[in-house]
Amino acid sequence: MKSGPDIAMVASLVGDPARANMLTALMNGRALTASELAQEAGITPQTASSHLAKLEAGGLIEPEKQGRHRYYRLTDDDVAGVLEGLAGLAARTGHMRVRTGPKDPALRRARICYDHLAGDLGVQMLDSLRERHLVKQKKQEIELTAEGERFLAKHLQISPDMLAHPRRPVCKACLDWSERRHHLAGTLGAAMMQRFAELKWAARDPTPGSRVVNFTRTGEKQFAALFGNGNR
Amino acid sequence: MKSGPDIAMVASLVGDPARANMLTALMNGRALTASELAQEAGITPQTASSHLAKLEAGGLIEPEKQGRHRYYRLTDDDVAGVLEGLAGLAARTGHMRVRTGPKDPALRRARICYDHLAGDLGVQMLDSLRERHLVKQKKQEIELTAEGERFLAKHLQISPDMLAHPRRPVCKACLDWSERRHHLAGTLGAAMMQRFAELKWAARDPTPGSRVVNFTRTGEKQFAALFGNGNR
DNA sequence: TTCATGCTTCGATGGTAGCCGAAGCATTGT
DNA sequence: ACAATGCTTCGGCTACCATCGAAGCATGAA
């Protein structure tokens, strides 16, 4: 008797308060771990696991494994758009919910992730590379373009043959824990970080065990000139 | 800990299959009675009543009383937009649902509603008047403009003083059961129907009890010339 | 290897909400 | 005034599903 998309199926996924809280937490575009989402929703990890499995089956979120963590993000901005729409409908009948912020701003701004740059600046760099078509990203896969090679040679004196490695990719997307978006890993990510250090643009914080990366004044300027918002 | 719109509240409304079927049935912009919606959802009237009350409380639908019927429509196209979005999300994960049509085409085309014209032509007439700014409609309220008065005097020899009545409005929106959209009621609606009969444009079907209105060939032409799609 | 952490599966429980029968109001027609 | 229709309210039943404790895997660290 009926045909057409089954909206009840997907709406009921959003209809549960716990799942709705998770989805709302993911609305900023960042990825969150299962535990974080559980906390966000105020439920135990096992319950959260069940919810996350359903959301994934419904195509609303996508998982990304990272070590023993499992990061989840909204599948795409179509999903975000629908959630936004639902929020709009809810708002006008008068039903409301903000988030709080963490700590250590320096660490969130720039830090070492193994051997490459992470944090706000790391994410910003990859964003810039991607939007200027110096790299092409499909999901997890990142590839350096011909323009990208020229750019690296010209501005950072990095040549393709410096990046070759038997068991490590040149480019790789790495999920950033503070920004919860991707930054650039792989041999290129490492080479660029190394170059930043050689050029005295940035240096790892001397405090033992610290992962903070401190940019110099000139380094900050140069970095912004190459990867700042102005170039986007 | 949380603030912002409570999307779960509204999503759960759509999340129930019965309610989702009702909402989907309303997606074509028409209004449907409670019983029809019950049938559409495959549930009894009492259950439907409960669902409709919830949808109304959630601001997704709005009722309109018409005699002993109670017509429901979607509140606005924001609601329709969100439903559309949900359908999009559902479609791409592969979950599907069409509607069937009723009977008696003559009755659906033109009929008497108390003393004024209803059916396809009735709705078409009000649409035309509204779009040419001969009347102004806000929700249920309809008002005749100065242009409208000139139009009526010129083409139908109807003057404002003919329309005055102590206990009845000049213009009124009346919900059409076949088109499920508004047609024109009130003293103006009655006067226009009367004029159509006097001009031999149309006459009530002679069959006892029939509400069908038959248009003559010339009447059809004249009507189309005044209120046809060409004027929109 | 052993331990710790993060996540998932299983099983049992409980609350919630959809559902319908019966009865009650409202409106219309005769 | 009476009957018929359309809708709503009430009460009780049932089924589903969110929730959590406990145990099982997987990954990474020591």
Image (cartoon, coloured by chain):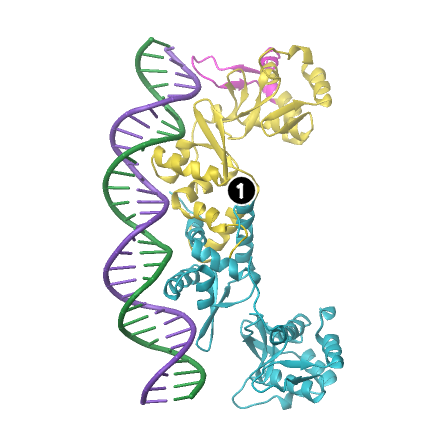
Chain colours: A cyan, B yellow, C purple, D green
Is residue A93 highlighted in magenta?
no
In the rendered view of the protein, which quadrant contains the C terminus of chain A?
bottom right
Identify the element where label 1 is drawn: loop
Q: Is residue A166 above or below residue B202?
A: below
Q: Is residue B100 visible?
A: no
Horizontal and vertical percent position of residue C7: 40, 70
| Along the viewing direction, whichever of A179 and B180 lies nearer the viewer | A179
Q: Along the horizontal axis of the image, is B31 left or right of A151?
A: left
Horizontal and vertical percent position of residue A220: 73, 78
Which subunit holds the residue at mark 1? A
Q: Along the horizontal axis of the image, is A173 left or right of A160?
A: left
Q: Is residue A126 above or below residue A89?
A: below
Q: Which residues are the magenta region?
A: B194-220
Provide the residue designation for mark 1.
Answer: A93
In the rendered view of the protein, which quadrant contains the N terminus of chain A?
top left
Q: Is residue A114 visible?
A: yes
Q: Along the horizontal axis of the image, is C19 left or right of A229?
A: left
Q: Amino acid at mark 1?
A: Thr
Q: How many marks?
A: 1
| Along the viewing direction, whichever of A44 and A72 lies nearer the viewer | A44
Packing grade of label 1 (10 A; few <14, some 14-19, many >=20) is: some
| Along the viewing direction, whichever of A116 and A60 lies nearer the viewer | A116
Horizontal and vertical percent position of residue B94: 43, 56
Horizontal and vertical percent position of residue B216: 57, 18
Q: Is residue A13 above or below residue B79?
A: below
